[in-house]
Amino acid sequence: MSVLELRDVRYTYQTQYQKVEALKGITHSFEEGLLHAIVGKSGSGKTTLLSLMAGLDLPTSGQVLCEGVPTDQMKLEQYRREKAAVIYQSFRLFPLLTVAENVMYPMELRGMKARQAKERAAALVERVGLPAEALDRYPTMLSGGEQQRVAIARALGMDTKILLADEPTGNLDTANGENIFSILQNLAHENCYCVVLVTHNPELAERADRVLELRDGLAVHERG
């Protein structure tokens, strides 16, 4: 079932010197239970498109729909909190919070009691393959691959069915990148998440269930 849909999405922004048409009419759908990849060279519009899907901004024209409702008819803050979780290349963990506290953060924002949030954080950390002792560590005490696992656990704590991953393997070596990809793939196939992966890695994209290729703000190829 299509959980996220793009209908003729266009996005234009103004720089100091010129108007830039970053997206030029993208129409595409994303389904639960599948790992989707968005590929393209730098400047093709991948990150802009992902930011619109994440509710960080609205299209200049066209619509992004979540479960049939356009994001321009929602409160974007609520959409970001309840519908779409983002996993970043740079992890974006809070350095002064422990692993447990980082994962608990979105749960507590939604009003979950601390004890329940801590129990759930422990379960999510285990789910992404980290040992229990990692819960009391700080991000700087972890490797890049471990930090990305924490970022995924935190995203899962948001209880959304849409996971948007912006180059999640970009700062990792091959082995850790493979592990992160496998986690995301399993979340799609085994837990029915809609996982959207922006990547420069053609080998990872080739293993996605569906691929959307962008070039100069246009969709030039779709597979799956």
Image: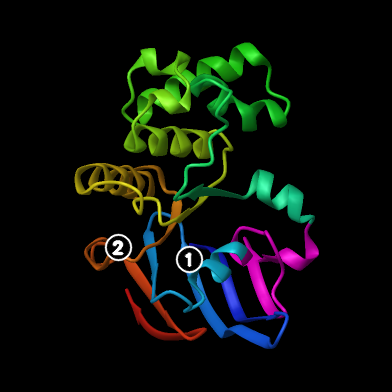
Q: How is the image coloured?
A: rainbow
Q: Position of residue 175 (x, y in %)?
A: 20, 43
Q: Residues within 10 Å of mark 2 (few under 14, many from 20)?
A: many
Q: From the viewer's perspective, is residue 66 above or below residue 23?
A: above
Q: Disc number at residue 185?
A: none
Label 2 belongs to which residue?
208
Q: Crowdedness of circle 1 by 10 Å Cα count: few (<14), some, many (20+)?
A: many
Counting from the top left corner in percent of width and height, residue 112 is at: 68, 23
Q: Which of the two discs, 1 and 2, sits closer to the camera?
A: 2
Q: Is residue 200 left or right of residue 121?
A: left
The segment highlighted magenta reads 52-74
Q: Which residue corresponds to mark 1?
A: 30
Residue 150 in picture, x, y percent from top left: 44, 32
Q: Quadrant of residue 60?
A: bottom right
Residue 57 is a magenta residue: yes
Q: Which residue: 66% across, 45% down?
A: 82
Amino acid type at mark 2? Ala
Quadrant of residue 158 within the rendered picture = top right
Check disc 1 and give the amino acid type.
Phe
Quarter-wise, where is residue 7 in the image? bottom right
The answer to whether marks 1 and 2 mark residues whose Cβ atoms lie closer than 8 Å is: no
In this picture, residue 80 sits left or right of residue 159: right
Q: Earlier in the sequence, mark 1 or mark 2?
A: 1
Q: Quadrant of the C terminus?
A: bottom left
